Amino acid sequence: MRCVITGLSLAWLCLGAAIPASTEDDARSIVTVELTDPSGPCWVHCSLPTGSITVRAGEAGKVIVEAVSRPESPPSERAEPGGALKRIPVTFSELTVEELENVVQVDTHSFYRPVDVSITVPVLTSLRLRSRDSGDFLIEGVNGEIDLENRGGAITLQGVSGTVVAYTLQGDIVAEIVEATPKKPMSFASLNGDLDITLPSAVQATVRIKSSRGEVYSDFAIEDAEVRQIEEEPARDSEGVFRAHVERVFSGKINGGGPEFQFHAYHGTIYIRRGQ
Amino acid sequence: MKCSEFQRLLPDYTTGNLTPAALRELEAHLSVCPACADEASRLRSAWERLGGLSEEAPGGALRTRFDAMLAQYVTQAECEAETGETDGAGADRGGTQGSGRVGAPSRPVGWWPRRPAAQFGLVLVLLAAGLGLGWHLRPGPGSRDIEALMSEVQRLRDEVALVRIDQASAVDRLSAINNIRQTGRLPASVLETLIGTLVSDPSVNVRLAAVDVLASHLDRQAVSDGLRGALPGQSSPLVQIAMIETLAGLDDPQGQQVVRDLLTDDRVDPAVRAHVRWRLGRSM
C-alpha cells in the first residue's frame, strides 16, 4: 500500500479536510500513518531544509507526524502599514508524508521558515534523519539502525538501542545507548561539537578515537590501548593567527573488543561513559 | 584473536590440520561470528569442489620424451664403447684436461664403470632415482589446492567487500569498510570503490571511515590521485580536513596545489580554510 499525504497550512488550502487522518491549523500539520504491516519493523526517513526533528517511541503499528512551522518574526526593517490592515501569518509546513511497506518518508520543503517535526514511531524503528539548518534532533526510546546528520544543531539520543551513526557540524552529540546490536559498528563525528556517548557497561567494542583539538575522557577500562599523538610546534600563520596542533589517535578494546566504534571530533571533547 | 587472525586458520580448519586447542578456539569463534562462519562455509565448499578434480599423472609426452632420451643414450653409449675399445681410456671430452683427445669419453671418477653395459645400467638406476626424487619433491596437489583456495577466498572476500559497501544502510557500509581495513589489502577494484565512496556516499561518517582506510595505503599512486580528485568537491568540512591531513603525509606538489586552491574557493567552510592556512604554513 502506498500512502501519500501532503499538508499545506494555509487555511484556504487545507488538504487535511479531505484526509481524515490529517488535521491542521495555521501552523501545525498532523498526519497519522497506519503501517502496511503493523507488527513489523518500521523505517522512517526525514529530511528537512531547516528545522528540528524529535522522534519518540510510541504505539506499534502507526507513525504520527506533527509538523509545526515556527512563528514568523515580524519584519523589522519594514514598517507595518497600520490602519485597518492586519498582518496575516503565512505559515507553510509544506509537509509531505509517504508510506510504502512500512517505510515512511517525511519531508518538508520550507527553505525559509524552519519547521519543527515531531514523529511518534513504533519502538522497532530505524531512522535516517537529515537537517541542514536551525534545529536540534532528539531521539527517545527507539530500537533500530539510527543514522543522523544535523548540520545546524545538536543531536541528543536518550534510551536508544541498536546502532548509531551520527554527525553534526556545529552541535554536540549526546547519546545514551542502553543496548548495542552485537557485531555492528557505530560512528560519531562532529566538527565543532563535543561527543558525549554513554554505552552499555557490557558492550564489546574496539574503539577508534580521533581528537584534533579536544580532550578524551572515559571511565571504561580500555585494553590494548594504542595512542598516536601528532604534536607540532605552535606557530603563527601568514595572517598572524597563533595555532597549536595536537592530534590524538587512540584505539583500544572495551570488554575484549568487538565491532569498531569510531569517535571523531575536530574541535570538541570526547566523553565515552560507562552506562548501566 | 581478531577475525582476520581466525580467518588465517580457516584453510587448516578446512583440511583438518588444526591442533585441538586451535580447533576449539576457532569453533567457539565461528559459533558467534556470522561473517567468519560464512567464510568457513565458502571455504569448505571451494575445498569440496577442488576435491572433485582428477589426480595429476605423467602425460603421454613424458613417456615419449623418456623413450627418445633413452634411445639416444643407448646409441651414444654404443658409440663410446666402440671408441673406448679402439682408443683406450683416459681422455677428456673437452680436450682441456688429460690427454686432450677430442671426442674421447671422460673417466672422471673411479666409481664410474668401464663397461658400457654397466654404465648403461647405472644410468638407468640414476635416471629412475632422479625421476622418483622429482616426483616426490614436486609441488603436491595439496599445496596447489591451498594456494588456489587462498586465492579463491581472497577473491570472494573482495567481492563481499564490494557488495557490502553498496548497501543502503550506513551501518552496513561502515561494516564493509572496517572489514577492508582489517584485511590490510586494497585490490584495485576495492580501491576504486573506496574512492567512489569518498566522492558520493551520503553519510559523512562513512566517508570519514573511507579516508581512514585510504590513509593506510599512501604508497599507492591511485590513492593520492583519488584524494586529490575528491577533495575539491567534498561537501563535509570534517572529511575535507581528514583528507588534507592525509595528503599532508605525502610529498606531493600536486596535492599541495589542490589544498592551496581551497583558500580561494568560496564554498569552502571557514574552518577548513583556517586549517589549510595553518597546514600550508607547516609541513606541507
Image (cartoon, rainbow, N blue to C red):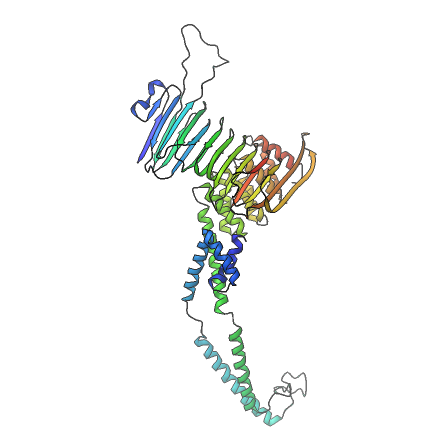
B146 versus B68 height, above or below: above
The residue lying toward the viewer, choosing from B283 and B147, is B147
> Quarter of the image holding residue A47?
top left
> Quarter of the image holding residue B238?
top right
Residue A9, image x, y percentages: 37, 21
The residue lying toward the viewer, choosing from A165 and A241, is A165
Q: Residue at x 67, y 38 (%)?
A: B282
Q: Taking B14 as reference, is B123 left or right?
A: right
Residue A261, image x, y percentages: 53, 42
Instruction: Decide if residue B254 is in sight here.
Output: no
> Quarter of the image holding residue A227?
top right
B224 versus B110 height, above or below: above
Q: In the displayed orientation, state which residue is furthest to the bottom.
A: B86
Residue B278, image x, y percentages: 65, 35
Q: Quadrant of the C terminus of chain B?
A: top right
B24 versus A217 height, above or below: below
Q: Taking B276 as reference, is A130 left or right?
A: left
Instruction: Decide if residue A161 is in sight here.
Output: yes
Q: Residue at x 50, y 41 (%)?
A: A186
The residue lying toward the viewer, choosing from B32 and B78, is B32
Q: In the displayed orientation, state which residue is furthest to the top.
A: A83
Residue B100, image x, y percentages: 67, 86
Q: Looking at the image, how many numbered discs can be counted on the residues?
A: 0
